[in-house]
Amino acid sequence: MTSLLLITQNCNGLRNKMKRQICFSWLKQQKADFILVQETHWSNDIENIIRKEWRGLTFFSHGSQNARGVAILIKYKCEFKISSEYKDQNGRVIIIECRVGEQKFIIVNIYAPNIHIKREMFFKNLYKMLLQKFNLSDLQTHLVIGGDFNCVFNPKLDTFNVKSIYKTPNSLKYLLKQCRLIDIWRKIHTYKMQYTWRNKYLKVASRIDFVLISKDLKNRILKTDIKPVVCGDHNAVTMVFKVDITKSGPGFWKFNTSLLTKSEYCDEVREIIIDIRKEKNESCMSW
């Protein structure tokens, strides 16, 4: 067994080179394996620059130079095998399907709209997208959804001094139920009041950034935290989980018993046995 670190953070714009270098430096210091970033404000023309600066694997879904944009960054010289990638056209969703050792993962990075009606439709479409593109019924595959959800699950625990009522989209509740997902930070920190976003006057706060995981992944979680960052107005959410990356050895030879159902194979084996018996009998006679 080994452990991997996943981090999700809304960076509130990473187009500025200096801010980007500060952010990348902090992420590398954390020794993160998977990084989900939102509000990148990146575009096609700087993709190669981003790849050179990060040096690891990069997956993008661009919004505009002033809004949206999500990306998944994977550390340099990773041992992960990426099997597929999917992204939307609005800079709100990027998904990769990968294998880490013996485990398969669907890693989803989202930046949900901040308007309730649009957010309701967003999570409805996200569920449809997952059903169409991936095999969610595969019990060997773990689903992980991280990012900025722009809503909370429990206003009493997840907000501070917020006057407006946060309403959890019904489509998000349905997504959690159908995909058997849990808010792992809240599962571990049952009654803790800690926030991922504060306004610039530090008088209003909420926990709107999450990492949701398949329930069957719960026993592999070692730690999950909310950490302050060096840039941006959102704190980062981190999750450390165990994976089995032991490579299988040569193993033992096993006979394929299905061959015994094939008459041609059996006839050939009988002929070989008869020939061997003849050879042995002849060798004995010669003595």
Image (tube, helix red, strand yellow):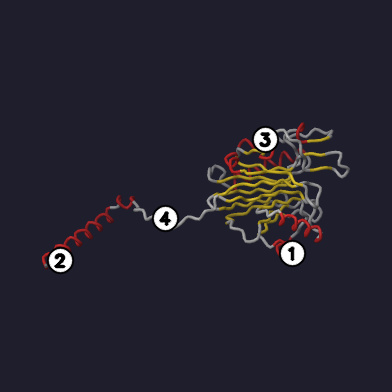
Q: Are marks 1 and 4 in contact (CB under 8 Å)?
A: no
Task: Between label 3 and label 4, give the one nearer the viewer.
Answer: 4
Q: Residue at x 67, y 37 (%)?
A: 188
> Mark 1 or mark 4: which comes first in sequence?
1
Write down the residue under mark 3. Answer: 173
Give the x, y percent position of residue 106. 61, 48
Task: Between label 3 and label 2, give the one nearer the viewer.
Answer: 2
Q: Are marks 2 and 4 in contact (CB under 8 Å)?
A: no
Write down the residue under mark 4. Answer: 251
Q: Residue at x 59, y 56 (%)?
A: 80
Task: Between label 2 and label 1, give the one nearer the viewer.
Answer: 2
In the rendered structure, find residue 49 and report the number of the disc placed on it: 1
Give the x, y percent position of residue 253. 37, 56
Choose top left, top right, bottom left or bottom right for residue 213. top right
Is the residue marked by circle 3 packed among few (<14), some (14-19), or many (20+) residues within 10 Å? some
Name the residue type under label 3.
Lys
Q: Nearer the viewer, residue 203 or 66?
A: 203
Q: CA distance from mark 3 to mark 2?
A: 79 Å
**Horizontal placement of 211 versus 140: left or right?**
right
> Mark 2 or mark 1: which comes first in sequence?
1
Task: Between label 1 and label 4, give the one nearer the viewer.
Answer: 4
Choose top left, top right, bottom left or bottom right for residue 189. top right
Is the residue marked by circle 1 packed among few (<14), some (14-19), or many (20+) residues within 10 Å? few
Q: Are marks 3 and 4 in contact (CB under 8 Å)?
A: no
